[in-house]
Amino acid sequence: MLDLIGALAVSAIVVIDLIVVIGFAVTSRPAKIIAFALAGAWVAVLVTLTATGRFAPGAIGPVPGPPLAFVVTVIAALVAWNGSARFRNALLSLPLEGLVGINALRVAGLFFLILLAQHRLPAPFAPSAGLGDIATGLGAIWLAARLASGRAVPSRSIAIWNAFGALDLVVAVTLGTLSAGFPLRVFGGSDEIAITSLPWVIIPTLLVPLYLLTHLTIAARLSSRRADRMAFAT
């Protein structure tokens, strides 16, 4: 039952995130269609690989599949960010409240705590990822509400939240990798880990890279805001 509820929740989060990040970006209609198609194709690849057992511990060697897929996605995003001004400008065109707001969905980190209670995820990965995501999500709700209402929000507050949210993801990926069959595994005593199965595998292989991209974009927006203030002051 939890997996079914999780599948519905993860699917909804993916759809909402993609609608905001792609649909609200200031770019051409063909570019949006291509972006949605690429995202859909990547999801299909992830589901197929997981369903055929390619992401199971030891299936492709000593290094587990999900962290490799995570690295591939992050590298692709960074290459696009640094190599395509059109891609970068499309992300920078997103409203700040939207970039912050989609992180509110990370309150779904509660699932990690439930999976921990069911002995399907190990500590310290599950409590770190779960509590960190919940804290990030609650902070995003507060910040996004203030930004959407037009009330002033200090850049420092957004920057602190943004750094915490990004660090939470980095720590979660690191602990998850060290719990999922890595040769130097130091956490977890079982080869069974829910994050390598559907629907949970979508989190590290798609959602985490997407949220890291939002944090990068927010940091760039804040840097631009500071640069504008300095230029105005001079």
Image: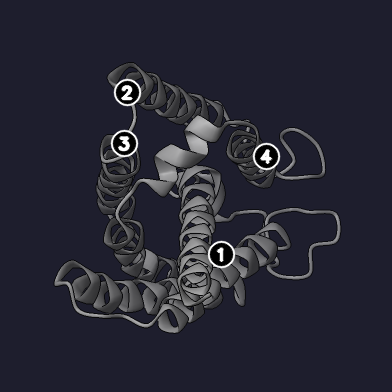
Tell me residue 228's x, y (percent).
Answer: 47, 65
Dot placed on the residue nearer the N-terminal end, 4 or 1: 4
Q: Residue furthest top?
A: 30
Decide: is 130 above or below 101: below
Q: Which of the two discs, 1 and 2, sits closer to the camera?
A: 2
> Looking at the rendered structure, which numbered label has been put on residue 75?
4
Q: Residue at x 49, y 31 (%)?
A: 86
Q: Which of the two discs, 1 and 3, sits closer to the camera?
A: 3
- Judged from the image, the secondary structure of the residue bearing numbered disc 1 is helix
Dot placed on the residue nearer the N-terminal end, 1 or 3: 3
- Judged from the image, the secondary structure of the residue bearing numbered disc 3 is loop
Judging by the rendered image, the residue that carries numbered circle 3 is 26
Tell me the amino acid under the disc marked 1: Leu
> Looking at the rendered structure, which numbered label has been put on residue 11?
none
- Judged from the image, the secondary structure of the residue bearing numbered disc 2 is loop
Q: Disc 1 and disc 2: Cα gap in Å?
A: 31 Å
Residue 158 found in image quarter: bottom left
Judging by the rendered image, the residue that carries numbered circle 1 is 169
Q: Disc 4 and disc 2: Cα gap in Å?
A: 24 Å
Tell me residue 193's x, y (percent).
Answer: 57, 56
- Judged from the image, the secondary structure of the residue bearing numbered disc 4 is helix
- Could you tell whether 198 is left or right of 75 in the image? left
Q: Residue at x 39, y 67 (%)?
A: 109
Tell me the amino acid under the disc marked 3: Val
Dot placed on the residue nearer the N-terminal end, 4 or 3: 3
